[in-house]
Image (cartoon, rainbow, N blue to C red):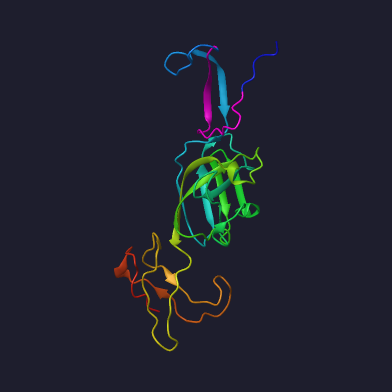
Amino acid sequence: ATGASYSWEGVAFTAAGGQYRLCWCAGGFKCSLESGVKVDVGELLLIGPSPLDQDRTCISGYACYIDGITGQELHSSDMFWIMDTCAAGTAWSSSTWAASPSLGLDQMVVQVSRSGASAFWAPDVLSLPGGQYRLCWCSGEASCTAVADFAVDLGRMTVIGPSPHDQRRTCVSGQTCRFGGIQGHLLGDGDMVMVLDTCAAHTAPCLQELGRTPPSKSLQLPLHDLTP
């Protein structure tokens, strides 16, 4: 008397946000897209980003600001994680570039306006290795605390920077220091290396000059002859 209820238990909807149609088929009949689902019951409003190819690019070690994320009824309580694979991969903690259940969400600011949603990560939050990742979304109506909560893949996140973060080199004090083979994603002319006791700490550099990639080595990996 109260009407039928329908549920997709255990199945996460990961389609693009938008307005869809609810189509009905009687039990006991063959319900196929071609012939059996002809009755339009009404509308299903799916909240979420749309389209699902909203690629963005950030630079490792710098504040990351992405804007213009469009979708259906996005909210400032929504969350974004940068992952290898949405809902199933590694959620990158940029401070340690290791698997973590949180990506500094308390340091991420999300704003939503008529022009679309924007998200901001502080520079100490986004310092993961350069490469290709996925930008994964979770509605603010969910808990957004577990990897599985971020099931919606709204596009590719390109991070420019060196990769991996364990590239070791050796130089001799009192001698010119040169080394090559520094690997990464989209490294280019003008990139610089400074030798410090601790990166980003205000300590005196061991080498007083900046190492630069020569202009003649544009976008070539490995990068040779970084000369201070």
Most extreme residue toward the left, as rendered? Answer: 216
Q: Residue at x 45, y 87 (%)?
A: 173
Q: Quadrant of the N terminus?
A: top right
The answer to which image quadrant residue 179 occupies is bottom left
Q: Nearer the viewer, residue 191 or 171?
A: 171
Instruction: Reply above or below: 17 against 103.
Output: above
Query: Does residue 23 belong to the magenta stretch?
Result: yes
Query: What residue is shown at x 49% (from left), y 41% (from top)?
Result: 154
12 vs 193, nearest the viewer: 12
Q: Which picture quadrant has residue 47?
A: top right
Quadrant position of residue 227: bottom left
User: In the current view of this chain or complex, which residue is farthest to the bottom?
Assistant: 174
Looking at the image, residue 221 sits to the left or right of residue 102; the answer is left
Q: Quadrant of the C terminus?
A: bottom left
Name the residue: 50% across, 33% down.
Answer: 15
- Across and down, in percent, residue 116 comes to 54, 40
Estimate the x, y position of residue 210 in percent, counting from the top left.
44, 76
Q: Residue furthest right?
A: 1
**In this orientation, which residue lies closer to the viewer: 174 or 228?**
174
Which secondary structure type mostly characterizes the magenta part of the structure? Answer: loop
Would you say residue 147 sits in the magenta stretch? no
Residue 161 image position (x, y, % from top left): 44, 61
Q: Residue drawn 53% across and 55% down? A: 64
Number of numbered discs = 0
**In the rendered image, the vertical position of residue 51 relative to residue 219, given as above or below:** above
**Residue 75 horizontal/vertical position (percent):** 62, 39
Magenta range: 7-26
